[in-house]
Image (cartoon, rainbow, N blue to C red):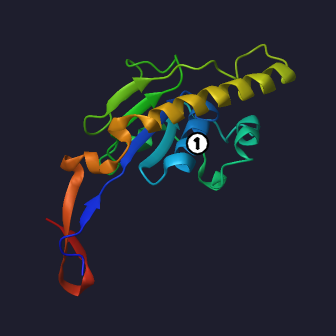
Amino acid sequence: MLRGKRVIDKYKVLFLCRENSARSIIAEALLRELAGHRFDVFSAGADPAARVHALALAQLRPGVSELGLLAPKSWLEFTGEWAPRMDIIISLDERVGDHLVPAFPGNPQFLKWDFADPLADGLTHDERTRSFEKVFWQIVRRVTLFMELPRYEYAAARPSRQVEAVACGSGAVCSS
């Protein structure tokens, strides 16, 4: 019986980039892999690409187990009535400014982490590969610092998001 147990929500984080094929995908995968027990992580973009960029996947392949979850999505998927309510929205692209971002439900905190675009025009294949590697390690550092912030250390620090779980009829769980 669940009476008296605390059910605690995870922090919901949405990473934004214009095409949602590289930087935001990398950030989503890293935060999910490193702290998925504390964060529900998503990514999206204004103009989503058809697929995740191959060089982004190449950076992630050695350490991220759930690559199948990664796919470019429109940020409009997170603005509807049934969309998950984000706690934190993080822009990773200087082209995704406050004036371009749609209204998201709730009152999410908006952060900006600007990284160079590894898909910028005019790069040779070798320059692009090095750019992806550099951006990957910059995102690793930023995500690690973010995870270690005391305010995000434990979801239990958010009493307003906690609910008491009680047993309801037919074995269902309700919140009170």
Who's the residue at 23% across and 50% down the image? 161
- Residue closest to the eye, 166 or 117: 166
Report the quarter where the N terminus lies.
Answer: bottom left
As helix, strand or loop, the secondary structure at mark 1 comes to helix
Locate residue 10 relative to residue 52 in the image: left or right.
left
Where is 90 relative to 86, above or below? above
Extreme residue toward the top, this view: 122
Residue 93 position, x and y percent, is: 54, 22
Who's the residue at 48% across and 35% down the image? 15
- Quarter where residue 88 is shown: top left
Who's the residue at 74% across and 22% down the image? 131
Report the quarter where the C terminus lies.
Answer: bottom left
**For mark 1, what is the residue?**
30
Residue 5 position, x and y percent, is: 23, 69
Who's the residue at 60% across and 33% down the image? 140
- Quarter where residue 166 is shown: bottom left
Extreme residue toward the bottom, this view: 170
Locate residue 39 relative to residue 68 in the image: left or right.
left
- Quarter where residue 134 is shown: top right
Where is 46 relative to 154, above or below? above
- Residue closest to the eye, 163 or 123: 163
Where is 66 relative to 28, above or below? below
Extreme residue toward the left, this view: 176
Residue 123 position, x and y percent, is: 79, 16
Q: Is residue 175 visible?
A: yes
Q: At label 1, which amino acid type do we have?
A: Leu
Residue 54 position, x and y percent, is: 76, 39
Q: Is residue 45 visible?
A: no
Q: Residues within 10 Å of mark 1 (few under 14, many from 20)?
A: many
- Residue closest to the eye, 25 or 153: 153
How many marks the image carries: the answer is: 1
